[in-house]
């Protein structure tokens, strides 16, 4: 019984139900949507969002935010794409991409955790720098001569219609989820976000944990960049622009609280699927893709406002319960 | 003039003035064209929207919030003017009024969610940036003109907003900026309303207990920011002569940089209009001078602006660190702390 209650209470479950409901509503309006290949396509297109949303989740767990992931992703995609295009060793290119992700993460972590600069402002700065560096790498041309063998990986499937990339992303998410919830170090992230001062007092290294969160976020963005290059096949100087906002939105949709300390990476992955599906679903509902941003905005705002109101109500209820218990105690003592 | 540099922010404001002078010296010596006043005045069109908006975003940040939706409101304003004028046949000034009114509504909606529902400002304005840029796209699809072309052919009276030159030198948009800066300065530093904004930013609970309707104050700052974005949208539409839904582009980083460089504390409670105004002009000159004097592609301008933002915030964090402050105190035992 308690297991069922726990499952129902988990926030990612409600976002999963939301996703299913979304699919069903679209299916009712347009029955041709409910085919295996359409549903799997929704999941497959979300792979880049899934990776960066899981990375972003770490930053948000610790109570911070990282808005540099979009440019980080684009920069890595540009560098890796250029290297592969020039015929360099693939694994060398991947290595360089991941190292860039680590370096960006370290810089962000240093600025936010060590220098105590507000995270939004610091990462906004690194976002600008990375975007500029990306222009320097790509220039006026695009990276569009990627070898076919590199692009073809994205169309390979592993289980059913699910692409090899999406399967890997899901596997990675599940592994990260278990590391986060079942290991001592993994729980540090949530603890720091829940109460940084308290975490420090019980001996959790808050600064180091935050730096780790940013490094993980940077690496996930780099991974997303590599897959972006392979999936899309073209990297322009605008690639990845605005992805940071989609990643934040995915986390919020997945039930992660932006004040930190609440949520799971599974939720972030589900949120990413919702984010990626919206434009795909619109096509089936007969809307133009012009509605994409407006609907994303409406969904995002509705969810956060509803969430805030529910939390407020719960807080008031708890306070009343405490107050009632206290007055009961006082009256009992008075009676005695 | 001297009086402006007194007060808590004096040290920082003098630093900003120094930065401006430095920019003039460096850019002016690299390329004398930079010092031609008419050219400089015309070029101000490219960055005046950053200046106009950042002044009012400063107020939002003083209350402890942040506003990243303003750049999408700029585009929404622009496209509403175009569609209302061309496709609905409204008078151009009625169209402008309608656009400003819609922008104020957008600001009020986001402000309401932040102030009355207690959602984080960052999330609400993130949602707002999606929503309003999406709405702008939808409005543009109402028009008979293709969205990528933009609506053009505005009457001369409207275009005059950016063409008129007062005394033959100072273009109208600079007058608009200066007027708004004076209004904002008066509001923030000379009225009860301004004092309330600061108090809400320092401690909202305390403000609430002392009888201030803190929620209304917070909401009003978002409306002001949105209206300033609308004014910027009008000026930009008049200057470019076309109305497009994505005219705001990526102003966000420049605006936040201007606020932070101007000495606004993103945690609230601190900031000044003069500081932001000076900082936004410094950023504008940077955006104008870099391509002109050093042949840097405008697309690369994100690098220096980003570096500036990071250096300023890290530098200020360094100055505030106890160990560094102790050393500074030893170095200058008689001087009082530089206002940072």
Image (cartoon, coloured by chain):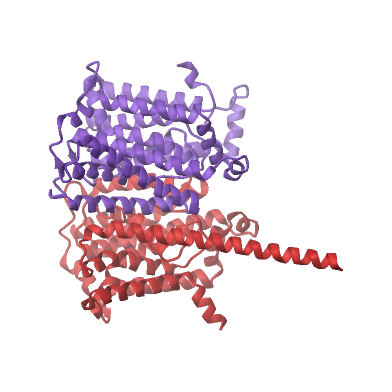
Q: Is residue A45 above or below residue B306?
A: below
Q: Quadrant of residue B81?
A: top left
- Which quadrant is the N terminus of chain B positioned in? top left
Give B265 or A323, whichever is nearer the viewer.
A323
Give A254 or A202, whichever is nearer the viewer.
A254
Image chain in purple: B
Q: Is residue A79 left or right of residue A253?
A: left
x and y percent of residue B311 in the render?
42, 38
**Residue at screen point 36% across, 46% down:** B105
**Residue at screen point 29% across, 53% down:** A75
x and y percent of residue B60 in the render?
45, 40
Q: Is residue A6 left or right of residue B278?
A: right
> Can residue B306 be seen from the camera position used here?
no
Q: Quadrant of residue B226?
A: top left
> Can residue B140 be seen from the camera position used here?
yes
Q: Is residue A149 left or right of residue B272?
A: left
x and y percent of residue B39 in the render?
21, 23
Name the residue furthest right.
A336
Give A328 or A10, whichever is nearer the viewer.
A328
**Residue at screen point 54% across, 27% down:** B8
x and y percent of residue A201 in the render?
65, 56
The hue of chain A in the figure is red
Q: Quadrant of residue A334?
A: bottom right
């Amino acid at each position: 019984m308690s297991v069922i209650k726990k499952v129902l209470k988990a926030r990612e479950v409600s976002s999963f139900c939301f996703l299913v409901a979304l699919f069903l509503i679209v299916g009712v309006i347009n029955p041709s949507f409910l085919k295996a290949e359409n549903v799997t396509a929704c999941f497959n297109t979300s792979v880049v969002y899934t990776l960066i949303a899981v990375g972003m989740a770490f930053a948000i767990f610790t109570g911070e935010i990282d808005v540099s992931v979009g440019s980080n992703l684009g920069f890595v995609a540009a560098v890796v794409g250029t290297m592969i295009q020039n015929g360099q060793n693939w694994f060398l290119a991947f290595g360089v991409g991941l190292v860039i992700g680590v370096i960006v993460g370290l810089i962000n972590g240093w600025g936010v955790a060590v220098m105590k600069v507000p995270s939004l402002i610091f990462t906004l700065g690194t976002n600008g720098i990375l975007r500029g560096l990306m222009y320097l790498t790509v220039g006026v041309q695009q990276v569009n001569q990627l070898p076919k063998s590199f692009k073809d990986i994205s169309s390979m499937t592993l289980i059913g219609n699910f692409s090899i990339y999406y399967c890997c992303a899901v596997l990675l998410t599940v592994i990260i989820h278990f590391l986060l919830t079942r290991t001592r170090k993994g729980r540090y992230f949530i603890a720091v976000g829940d109460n940084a001062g308290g975490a420090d007092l019980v001996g959790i290294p808050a600064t180091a944990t935050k730096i780790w969160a940013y490094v993980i976020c940077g690496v996930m963005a780099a991974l997303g960049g590599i897959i972006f290059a392979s999936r899309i096949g073209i990297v322009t100087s605008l690639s990845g622009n605005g992805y940071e906002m989609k990643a934040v939105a995915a986390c919020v949709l997945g039930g992660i609280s932006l004040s930190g300390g609440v949520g799971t990476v599974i939720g972030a992955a589900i949120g990413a699927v919702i984010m990626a599906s919206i434009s795909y679903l619109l096509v089936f509902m007969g809307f133009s893709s012009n509605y994409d941003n407006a609907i994303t905005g409406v969904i995002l705002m509705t969810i956060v406002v509803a969430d805030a109101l529910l939390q407020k109500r719960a807080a008031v209820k708890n306070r009343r319960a405490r107050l009632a218990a206290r007055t009961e105690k006082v009256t009992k003592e008075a009676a005695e | 003039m001297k009086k402006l540099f007194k007060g808590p922010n004096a040290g920082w404001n003098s630093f900003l003035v120094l930065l401006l002078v430095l920019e003039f010296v460096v850019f002016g010596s690299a390329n004398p064209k930079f010092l031609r006043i008419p050219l400089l005045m015309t070029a101000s069109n490219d960055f005046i929207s950053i200046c106009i908006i950042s002044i009012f975003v400063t107020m939002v940040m003083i209350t402890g919030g942040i506003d990243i939706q303003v750049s999408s409101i700029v585009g929404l304003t622009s496209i509403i003017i175009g569609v209302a004028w061309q496709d609905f046949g409204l008078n151009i000034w009625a169209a402008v009024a309608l656009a400003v009114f819609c922008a104020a509504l957008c600001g009020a909606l986001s402000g309401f969610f932040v102030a009355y529902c207690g959602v984080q400002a960052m999330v609400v304005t993130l949602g707002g940036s999606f929503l309003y840029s999406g709405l702008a796209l939808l409005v543009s699809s109402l028009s008979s003109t293709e969205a990528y072309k933009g609506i053009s052919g505005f009457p001369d009276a409207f275009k005059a907003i950016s063409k008129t030159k007062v005394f033959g030198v100072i273009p109208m948009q600079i007058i608009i900026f200066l007027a708004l800066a004076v209004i904002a300065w008066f509001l923030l530093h000379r009225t009860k309303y301004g004092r309330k904004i600061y108090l809400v930013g320092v401690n909202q609970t305390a403000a609430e207990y002392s009888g201030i309707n803190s929620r209304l104050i917070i909401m009003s700052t978002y409306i002001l920011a949105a209206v300033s974005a609308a004014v910027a949208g009008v000026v930009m539409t008049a200057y470019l002569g076309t109305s497009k839904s994505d005219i705001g582009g990526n102003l966000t980083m420049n605006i936040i940089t201007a606020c932070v460089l101007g000495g606004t504390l993103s945690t609230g409670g601190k900031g000044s209009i003069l500081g932001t105004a000076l900082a936004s002009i410094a950023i504008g000159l940077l955006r104008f001078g870099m391509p002109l004097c050093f042949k840097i592609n405008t697309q690369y301008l994100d690098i220096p602006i980003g570096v500036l933002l990071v250096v300023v915030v890290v530098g200020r964090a360094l100055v505030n660190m106890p160990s560094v402050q102790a050393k500074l105190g030893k170095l200058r035992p008689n001087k009082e702390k530089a206002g940072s």
